[in-house]
Image (spheres, rainbow, N blue to C red):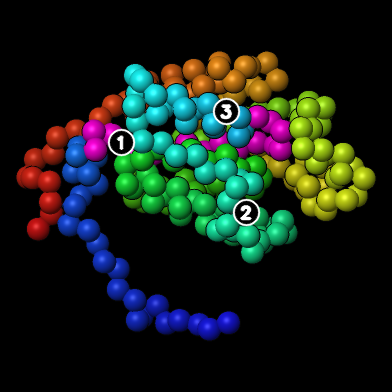
């Protein structure tokens, strides 16, 4: 594999400030990070949330980044070892950051089992001054295994899938999630309402604010 010298690279900043972009788009960019066990309902909630944000009365630019879907393309070279899981989350955190910086609402639905990896994603956004909303879709592993829509728990119990989160690999529960959805007792519609309620309460669904000094930094 070839190597590169970072000293040969130069970051090319945009003269358009993020607040100016937000004003032009009439939208604030942010990332909504759904985390939880397989079969917790992350993807189903994320899909419904994306639809709600795109539809009236919000009419926002939102895009869903799904854990399985990403592994068909961008992360198709990664497995499920601890190192690969960390790299999987690092890449998607960077992609979500780009979406948020463009003033879109990035909705990610990834198991993201390691606390340190989720904190890395949060810190990337914090450094850029972009909102990061962690949503823990909480479900007991017994309930997730009972649902098992893809038959993955059954395969994991039979030893056909190695390093499966909740069975043979750990899931580190969030300690400071902004929203906790109790999946076992909350419908998809209620979960979306709960998340939207948080976003509205924090003013994250409002348009960009006017900035003094024009739209472009010179």
Location of residue 58 with respect to 94 vertically, above or below: above
Residue 80 placement, left or right of 157? left
Estimate the x, y position of residue 69 in percent, counting from the top left.
60, 47
Tell me how far mark 3 sits from mark 2, CA to CA: 20 Å
Residue found 37% across the figure and 44% down from its top: 100
Q: Report whether residue 131 is seen.
A: no
Label 1: how many Cα within 10 Å (few below 14, some 14–19, many 20+): many
Q: Earlier in the sequence, mark 1 or mark 2?
A: 1
- Residue identified by numbered label 3: 45
The mark closer to the camera, 1 or 3, is: 3
Estimate the x, y position of residue 159 in percent, counting from the top left.
90, 49
In which quarter of the view is residue 206 placed?
top left
Location of residue 71 with respect to 196 vertically, above or below: below
Label 3: how many Cα within 10 Å (few below 14, some 14–19, many 20+): many
Q: Secondary structure at mark 1?
A: loop
Residue 78 placement, left or right of 4? right
Q: Earlier in the sequence, mark 1 or mark 3?
A: 1
Estimate the x, y position of residue 196 in percent, counting from the top left.
44, 22
Q: Secondary structure at mark 3?
A: helix
Q: Earlier in the sequence, mark 3 or mark 2?
A: 3
Tell me how far mark 1 sits from mark 3, CA to CA: 21 Å
Marks counted in the figure total: 3
**Which quadrant is the C terminus positioned in?**
bottom left
Q: Report whether residue 189 is seen.
A: yes
State the residue in front, 89 or 175: 89
Which mark is on residue 28? 1
- Residue identified by numbered label 2: 71
Provide the residue span drawn in magenta.
Answer: 25-41
Q: Secondary structure at mark 2?
A: loop
Residue found 62% across the figure and 17% down from its top: 187
């Amino acid at each position: 594999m070839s190597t590169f010298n970072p000293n040969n690279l130069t970051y090319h900043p945009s003269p358009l400030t993020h607040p100016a972009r937000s004003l032009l788009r009439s939208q604030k960019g942010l990332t909504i990070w759904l985390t939880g066990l397989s079969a917790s309902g992350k993807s189903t909630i994320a899909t419904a949330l994306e639809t709600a944000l795109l539809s009236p009365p919000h009419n926002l630019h939102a895009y869903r980044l799904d854990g399985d879907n990403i592994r068909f393309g961008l992360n198709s070279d990664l497995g499920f070892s601890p190192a690969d899981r960390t790299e999987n989350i690092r890449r998607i955190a960077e992609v979500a950051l780009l979406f948020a910086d463009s003033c879109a609402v990035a909705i990610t639905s990834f198991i993201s089992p390691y606390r340190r990896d989720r904190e890395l994603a949060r810190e990337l956004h914090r450094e850029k001054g972009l909102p990061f909303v962690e949503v823990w879709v909480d479900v007991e592993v017994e309930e997730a295994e009972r649902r098992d829509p893809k038959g993955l728990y059954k395969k994991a119990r039979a030893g056909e899938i190695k390093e499966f989160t909740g069975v043979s690999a750990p899931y580190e529960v969030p300690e400071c999630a902004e929203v906790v959805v109790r999946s076992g007792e909350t419908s998809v519609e209620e979960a979306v309402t709960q998340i939207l309620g948080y976003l509205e309460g924090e003013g994250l669904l409002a348009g960009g604010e006017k900035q003094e000094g024009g739209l472009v930094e010179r």
